[in-house]
Amino acid sequence: MNRLSMFSEAKRRLGDLYERYPEASVVVSMQNQLDYLIQIESGESTDRSRLKEIVLGVQTAREIEPRDEETAAFMYEVTDAVQEMIRLTPAR
């Protein structure tokens, strides 16, 4: 699965999770981060300066893992993809 598809799928899964657990307001922040990643991967944005601010892994550990282990496992794969993006981004 390419990163664009992965990020879109993650956003869908988080939306489903939020419907089941509306008190998990951190999901909104996670979806905003995914929107940013989707913009980069789709070519809509070239601003990669905020990549290091992505905290999906921490949010997954705190809020998603206790609620849905399958979604958490997928989000950790997303986190790995973000780390790869950071490694491939030239330093400024």
Image (cartoon, rainbow, N blue to C red):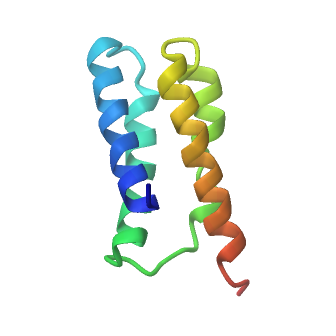
Q: Position of residue 62 (x, y in %)?
A: 63, 22
In the displayed structure, does residue 10 sit left or right of residue 80?
left
The image quarter containing residue 55 is: top right
Q: Position of residue 60 (x, y in %)?
A: 58, 30
The image quarter containing residue 2 is: bottom left
Q: Position of residue 33 (x, y in %)?
A: 45, 51
* Residue placed most toward the observer, 7 or 35: 7
The N terminus: image quadrant: bottom left
On screen, residue 91 above or below 79 = below
* Residue placed most toward the observer, 77 or 51: 77
The C terminus: image quadrant: bottom right
On screen, residue 80 above or below 74 = below
Q: Give the farthest residue toward the front.
A: 1
Image point (50%, 22%), residue name: 70
On screen, residue 1 above or below 11 = below
Image point (40%, 41%), residue name: 10
* Residue placed most toward the observer, 4 or 64: 4
Image point (64%, 26%), residue name: 61
Report the number of discs: 0
In the displayed structure, does residue 21 sit left or right of residue 26?
left
The image quarter containing residue 87 is: bottom right
Q: Position of residue 50 (x, y in %)?
A: 56, 66
